[in-house]
Amino acid sequence: MQVNTLILGAGAAGLHCAAHCGPGTLVLDHAKAAGEKIRISGGGRCNFTNTGTTAANFISSNPHFAKSALARYTQWDFIDLVNRHGIPWHEKTLGQLFCDTSAKDIIAMLLAEMAENAQLWLNTSIGTIRRGDTGFHVATKRQGGVQTITARNLVVATGGKSIPKMGATGLAYQIAEQFGLNVTSTRAGLVPFTFSDEKFKPLAGVATPARVGTQDGTAFDEALLFTHRGLSGPAVLQASSYWREGEEITITLSPDFDLAAALRGHRQTDGRKALSTVLGQYLPARLVDFLAADLELAGNVADASDARIDALVEALSRWRLKPAGTEGYRTAEVTLGGVDTNGLSSKTMEAKSVPGLYFIGEAVDVTGWLGGYNFQWAWSSAHAAGTAIAAGG
Ligand SMILES: Cc1cc2nc3c(=O)[nH]c(=O)nc-3n(C[C@H](O)[C@H](O)[C@H](O)COP(=O)(O)OP(=O)(O)OC[C@H]3O[C@@H](n4cnc5c(N)ncnc54)[C@H](O)[C@@H]3O)c2cc1C
């Protein structure tokens, strides 16, 4: 069988690309349904983009690489598409846009957009890939039958390694290496931290606003969540993408509030209250109990000197912890690293050394922050490749 464009992977990037490649497009996926990660994303409501998207929200060995694709297909272009399909959405926080009803609306939209020019084969396994004079020859197996598909253009959109249970594989990296492209080292991103002694077990379920910083000076102000195994919540997931094995993280509790001034005020108004009780007005009571021994919280507020209050607030602003590790690809939302951008055109996503071979989406060494950025990268990179192919690539 011969097609103009073969897209490997029916996830966010593959489906969106299929809508732009023009006639003769075939999308293959080994999963039984398309867009499975879209379906579970954003708690089932898909945080499909972020109104504040810029290249600064992405991590890559080349921080400039994403600029071109993001500029030529922006968050506003995707919002227009969502609006044209009448999908209701809302902004939750920090520019994050979610579906009102279901992430399935986004999958249905992507399938409708590609229906005119592209076919979709699910439950299809991908075998060997060869490049010949007429294009790429890809061996496939579907419903027990083996078939080789020849394609002028091959778009690799098989994502990263996160959540192998959902069908994630390292296929994109293998294909890149097969064709002589470099792959930067990969690791789990947007992932909870674990601690070997399970020290936060008594706090499981407690959430509080915090600033979580890593040793490279990056810090995120969002919610922190204690879990049985360690730390999670948006601030921690964000920080995890900047953390390296063996490093410390620094937590600032109550980051946007002048706790020292508040505690001094309490000395006048309710000096007889226990310091721990007053602190419990600003931090979760279970967390105050947990910290009580280390912070020497015994006594009343009235007895707390300025120096003691300053020392206490300093300790709460520089809580240094050394995670044992992360939960890994099992629960990571993304894979950091991937197909080296040095080998790709930032305008078209085509491999510089292999005409007709494209890499898009999470497979590429471009990883977004939490908050809709990863889908925006999938849409933008898919559009870059799809329009280049339609224009005769
Ligand atoms: C739980 C969770 C929640 C998330 N929530 C959000 C969110 O709200 N907002 C956001 O921006 N990002 C979110 N993300 C990240 C986002 O889902 C990904 O960045 C995005 O899906 C990447 O798109 P992609 O098309 O590159 O890869 P994917 O969407 O992962 O698609 C890859 C496709 O390739 C197929 N495939 C893989 N290997 C093979 C193979 N060997 N043979 C055949 N097919 C193969 C897979 O079955 C899959 O369909 C979330 C991720 C997770 C895990």
Image (cartoon, rainbow, N blue to C red):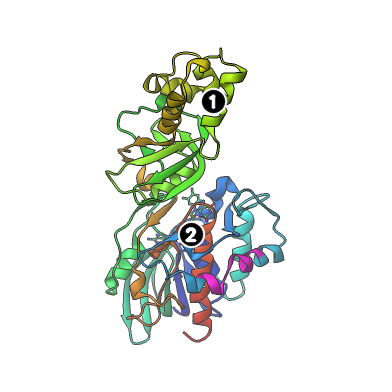
On the image, the x and y values in percent for residue 185 come to: 29, 59
Q: CA distance from mark 1 to mark 2?
A: 36 Å
Location of mark 2 (residue): 57
Q: Is residue 168 visible?
A: no
What amino acid is labelled 1 in the image? Leu
Does 123 appear above or below 23? Answer: above
- Amino acid type at mark 2: Asn
Specify whether residue 41 is painted magenta: no
Q: Is residue 223 above or below residue 347?
A: above
Q: Which mark is residue 320?
A: none
SS label for mark 2:
helix
Q: From the viewer's perspective, is 190 left or right of 71? A: left
Q: Quadrant of residue 339?
A: bottom left
Location of residue 202 (image quadrant): top left
> Magenta segment range?
70-79
x, y percent for residue 168: 40, 55
- Does label 2 point to a residue whose CB lies under 8 Å from ligand 1? no
Identify whether 266 is placed above or below 258.
above
Residue at 45 percent of width and 64 percent of height:
361
In this view, the residue in front, 300 or 28, is: 300
- Sequence-wise first label, 1 or 2: 2
Please check the rendered image and state whether residue 72 is part of the magenta-colored stretch, yes or no.
yes
Considering the numbered disc 1 on the image, is that residue within a helix, a strand or a loop? helix
Front in this rendered view, residue 201 or 153: 201
Residue designated by label 1: 263
